[in-house]
Amino acid sequence: MHTKNIVFYISLFIVALLVSFGIYDPDNLYVISSYVHKNIIDHFGWGYLVSVFVFLVFSLWLAFSRYGKIKLGKDYEKPQYNYFGWLSMLFAAGMGIGLIFFGVAEPFSHYMNPPAYIQQASGEAARFSMQYSFFHWGLHPWAIYIIMSLAIAYFCFRRDMPFLISSCFYPLIGPRIYGITGYFIDILAVFATVFGIATSLGLGAMQINSGLSEAFGIPDTMQMTLVIIATVTVLFMISSISGLDKGIQILSKTNIIVAIILMMLMLAIGPTSYILNIFTSTVGNYFSSLLDMSLNTHPFEGYRWTKEWTLFYWATWIAWSPFVGLFIASISRGRTIKEFILVTLFVPTVLTFAWFSVFGGSALHLELFQGVEIAGNAVENVSTALFQVFEHYPLSMPLTITAVVLLAVFFITSADSATYVLAMMTSRGDLNPPMSRKLLWGILQSATASILLLSGGVEALKKMVIAAALPFTIVMLFLCLAIMRGLRYEVKYESEESPGEGQ
């Protein structure tokens, strides 16, 4: 076996093994993954909170430190993409389908099932629901992505190392990144990416099916969901063949434009003043309570809720960080560290806050002030939550069709970018991986999503992805150390060289 193919072949074997297990014995897979997941959350939950808070603080400190002016690339290099193209691809990869899926469903879930110390379906539960939706989708997930993507972009574009996560550990383990240790890190990244994307694609296809059912009466069945996956697979494979500059960038720009149109439409026809009040008030609550939310596990009351939501989210974002980090790094060449961190941290966060305010706020207004009881049904069937809200506002059909189009484009973008990253990771960091490898991973990830939906193993493998977040949390803490060592060495080297240059 050629050494450059080790990560590729072992990754394929692991994916095939776990998918096969999910097909033939989904019950046992669920039992095993649930046991591993439960023990990690029970015993290491506090560690997720502390680690993610460290990532946020470290990112902000780094942006305003003396290292902020260093470029992610050579000093003479300019950014590869303009701001709109860069932000579009960044947002599509970082959030995408999940934001549409949970924009209504998560606030309603917290509203109907808050921690034990808050009264269910009350004004306080509504306030809590918006604040924690902001928290789960705000600064913290982007700080996680920043650590991973910054490390990759710095060591690969400025230090000319292979475009792999293992390359970032050179300051800590030296040439061993080219051996078994490096292979292990990269294989773990492939594993997390494949099953994280498969779960996301499965959820996205289910919601597209629900939207088509609402709009056109198409049957909301498993067979139709599989047809949707097959159709979208063909579309994102065409995009993948077009390459990063054409395919993903065009789709990502389309995403942002359609998302803003949908959001502005809802803002205009919904309770506009109420939405703006929610946005203003919740942003204030969010920032005034940021430290408390970041480190509070609610050990005396509400710990079960924290495990099911905050700890689950933090583990999910960490498990997604290899894929998102590699992709964001690949489009961020030429940015300074300060520019990269501040834009990545705050611009998508503000857009996310606006999204939850518009759609979550419109949904809560129906419940609290118009006597429309839809929260219970929306929580039971989260894939239809957004469309249930549309039914009670003008232009429900155009809104539903626009949301389905947005879901489809996000679906294609996520699958396309994941295909690119998987091909790159299994081609020793080649920024232009072979088309055959992109096609193979594209087919495999869609097949994996389909098989998991058919076998009922989606929940089991989703929990296995969460379990993979534990070693990646440790990996990312060491990444912070590797970034510091690399930057200190560079600044020290430059300060030692500069006197000689002036003599």
Image (cartoon, rainbow, N blue to C red):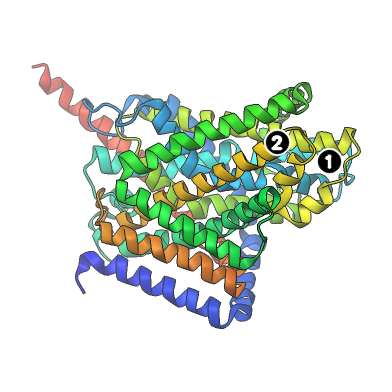
Looking at the image, can residue 477 be seen? Answer: no
Query: Dot 1, crowdedness within 10 Å: few (<14), some or many (≥20)?
Result: many
Give the mark, 2 or 1, whose residue is nearer the N terminus: 1
* Lateral position of residue 199 relative to residue 287, left or right: left
On the picture, is 491 further left or further right than 312?
left
**How would you rate the neighbour count of disc 2 (Cα within 10 Å): few for under 14, some for 14-19, many for 20 or more?**
many
Question: Can you say which quadrant of the picture contains the N terminus?
Answer: bottom left
Residue 333 occupies quadrant: top left
Q: Secondary structure at mark 2?
A: helix
Q: Is residue 308 left or right of residue 370?
A: left
Q: Residue furthest front?
A: 216
Quadrant containing the C terminus in the rendered view: top left
- Tell me the residue that label 2 is attached to: 359
Above or below for 242 versus 65: below
Locate residue 445, reporting x and y percent: 44, 63
User: Can residue 390 be spotted in the picture?
Assistant: yes
Q: State the residue lying farthest toward the bottom.
A: 24
Residue 335, image x and y in percent?
A: 34, 29
Q: Residue at x 80, y 35 (%)?
A: 127
Where residue 254 sits: x, y (%)? 47, 35
Taking the spot 75% from the left edge, 23% from the top edge, the residue there is 272
Q: Quadrant of residue 501?
A: top left
Which residue position holds label 1?
125
- In this rendering, the label closer to the viewer, 2 or 1: 2
Residue type beneath disc 1: Ala
Give 161 or 236, whichever is nearer the viewer: 236
Q: CA–CA distance between discs 2 and 1?
A: 17 Å
Type of amino acid at the residue the image marks with label 2: Phe
Q: Looking at the image, which residue is at 28% across and 49% down?
A: 163
Reply above or below: 309 against 178: above
